[in-house]
Image (tube, helix red, strand yellow):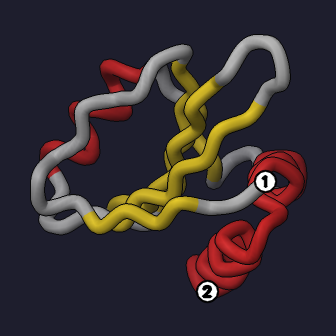
Amino acid sequence: MTDVILVMILLAVSGHATRVARAISDALPALVVSLEPADFGSIVSNAQQPLIITWQRGLLTKRFVYLCTHQGHTFVTESRSPLTLPADAKLLHAKN
């Protein structure tokens, strides 16, 4: 199942981030956990070199969206301002 999520993540990087994240959460609601930004920050801080995919959405109000996997679960969060991420995090900036 993690392989399917990773394929969808790679598709997200190709320019369809919002649609792919929505498809993941609709298709696999038990595997995608939506968190508050502070909780997301705690999880990625505890991971070693986390891979975090990020993108922006919104026309009038910009939202920063972050997605990562950790211990077999996929976590997503959204905030109005950029999050402070761990220095060792590997970031992929997806296009919308």
Q: Which of marks 1 and 2 is nearer the N terminus?
A: 2
Q: Is residue 82 above or below residue 4?
A: above
Q: In this view, does 6 lie to the left or right of 81?
A: right
Residue sitting nearer the eye, 28 or 60 = 60
- Residue 33 x %, y %: 57, 39
- Residue 35 x %, y %: 50, 27
- Residue 96 bears which disc, if any? 1
Based on the displayed image, in which of its 4 quarters is residue 11 positioned? bottom right
Q: As shown in the figure, which amino acid type bears the numbered disc 1?
A: Asn
Gap between marks 1 and 2 measured at Cα: 22 Å
- Residue 60 x %, y %: 81, 13
Which residue sits at x=57%, y=27%? 78
Q: How crowded is mark 2: few (under 14 residues within 10 Å), some or many (20 or more)?
A: few
Whether residue 1 is visible: no
Q: Residues within 10 Å of mark 1 (few under 14, many from 20)?
A: some
Name the outermost residue toward the front. 60
Residue carrying label 2: 3
Which residue sits at x=53%, y=60%? 93
